[in-house]
Image (cartoon, rainbow, N blue to C red):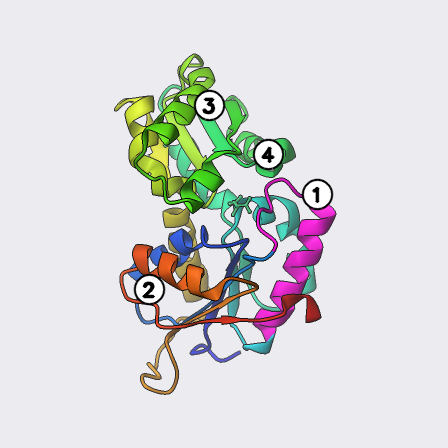
Amino acid sequence: MDRNSPIGVFDSGVGGLTVAREIMRQMPEERIIYFGDTARLPYGSKSQDTVLRYSRQIIRFLMTKEVKAIVIACNTASAYVLEAVERELDIPIIGVIRAGARTAVHSTRNGKIGVIGTEGTISSGIYTDVMRQMRPDIEVSVKACPLFVPLVEEGLLHDTVTDEIASRYLSVLKGRFIDTLVLGCTHYPLIRSTLGRIMGDEVTLVNPAYETAVELKELLREKELTCQTRKDGEEEKYQFYVSDLAEKFTAFATSILPNEVKETKKIHVEEY
Ligand code: DGL
């Protein structure tokens, strides 16, 4: 495996850019091939079988780009498919759940943790299972927040509508006296300030995107896959692919990434 190959990152759409952004910040030398499945979003309300089929197609596409490792930046896909696909691959693949769960378990002082995510992630029970394996006495309260994804996609990051919906969703968790809240969906870090204001200063918000990048860095180092030679000028360091609406993706990506995204290519991922 060539250690200077790119890292593949995928998500159901734009949300995984929060993970790509952390990888760019923490490992500026690495190249990234990002795929957002914008034609088939949301994954959060789909069945496990469907998300597995979609994910396998995306992984096959990323393999054609000779990626050295893959990050499943989507919480729903991480919850549903990581276990199955890691057995099928001979390159390292990680999801976002373990990193988020580990940070939450380390950060809680009173042992009461909240998790918010899509319907798929929450109903899979994976955050609770992983955190209980790490610390059996932990008390986990969960809440699916399906309206957050469309609100973020609509750009209502600082809006009274988002405030109102967030207050309703989070009221049940406030009543459980949690001191740590896992933002278990790619989109939620983008409304972090709203969520933080509602939960209050005493609640630590955990962003699995940050911790996933830390875990990836460690994994690449351990497997001796850290990039050594910058191939500047040969091709774009960060390449973006989607299954639909490439221009909309480019605009959104440019608004949240440190550098302008010049181009996003649309591909027919179902052919892989
Ligand atoms: N990327 C998904 C996640 O993190 C959210 C969007 C979707 O439902 O596809 O769970």
Q: Secondary structure at mark 2?
A: loop
Q: Kindly identify the amino acid type of the residue bearing the numbered disc 2.
A: Met
Q: Kindly identify the amino acid type of the residue bearing the numbered disc 1.
A: Ser
Asked if disc 3 is less than 8 Å from ligand 1, the answer is no
Q: Which residue is mark 1?
A: 47
Whichever of labels 3 and 1 marks the residue nearer the N terminus, that label is 1
Q: Main secondary structure of the magenta part?
A: helix
Q: How far is the residue under mark 2 from the one under mark 3?
A: 35 Å
Instruction: Determine which of the numbered discs, if any, sits on residue 27 in the image.
Output: 2
Q: Are marks 1 and 2 in contact (CB under 8 Å)?
A: no
Whichever of labels 1 and 2 marks the residue nearer the N terminus, that label is 2
Q: How far is the residue under mark 3 from the one under mark 4?
A: 13 Å
Q: Are marks 2 and 4 in contact (CB under 8 Å)?
A: no
Q: Which residue is mark 4?
A: 119
Q: Nearer the viewer, mark 1 or mark 2?
A: 1
Q: Which residue is mark 3?
A: 169
